[in-house]
Image: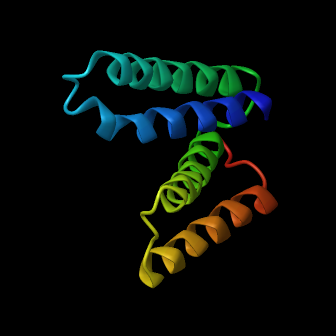
Amino acid sequence: MAYLALAILSEVVATTLLPLTQAFTRLAPSVGCIAGYIAAFYFLSLATAAGMNSATAYAIWCGVGIVLLALVQALIGNVPNVATVIGMLLIVTGVTVINLAGSVSH
């Protein structure tokens, strides 16, 4: 689960940097963004190699990443609207159901 947490954090950092790259024309944010995505996929691969089901890992990675990114965006002034918050609550509910139900069978 630690690998998955690192994958999520790496992805959130990379996605937060993405607009700052200005279509990858600014070097420092571009390098940080690319490094973040590489780290995210690396840690996601370690999570699945350690035995976590790929579908479950990906669902958690996406769901938690979306919510964390929205929180980061809210902290810098881009507050989500009510529909977005409801959608994120549905995502959190879905990830919770996936975790409570256990892994998807292969």
For residue 98, above or below residue 1: below
In percent of width and height, residue 65 lies at: 56, 48
For residue 97, above or below residue 53: below
In percent of width and height, residue 27 lies at: 29, 16
- Left or right: where 28 falls relative to 11: left
At x 28%, y 30%, the residue is 21
Q: Nearer the viewer, residue 55 or 83?
A: 83
Please tell me in which quadrant of the rendered image residue 44 appears. top right
In percent of width and height, residue 63 lies at: 57, 55
For residue 46, above or below residue 70: above
- Left or right: where 22 falls relative to 97: left
Residue most toward the bottom? 82
On-image quarter of the N terminus:
top right
At x 78%, y 53%, the residue is 102
For residue 60, above or below residue 39: below
Question: How is the structure coloured here?
Answer: rainbow
On-image quarter of the C terminus:
top right
Please tell me in which quadrant of the rendered image residue 29 appears. top left
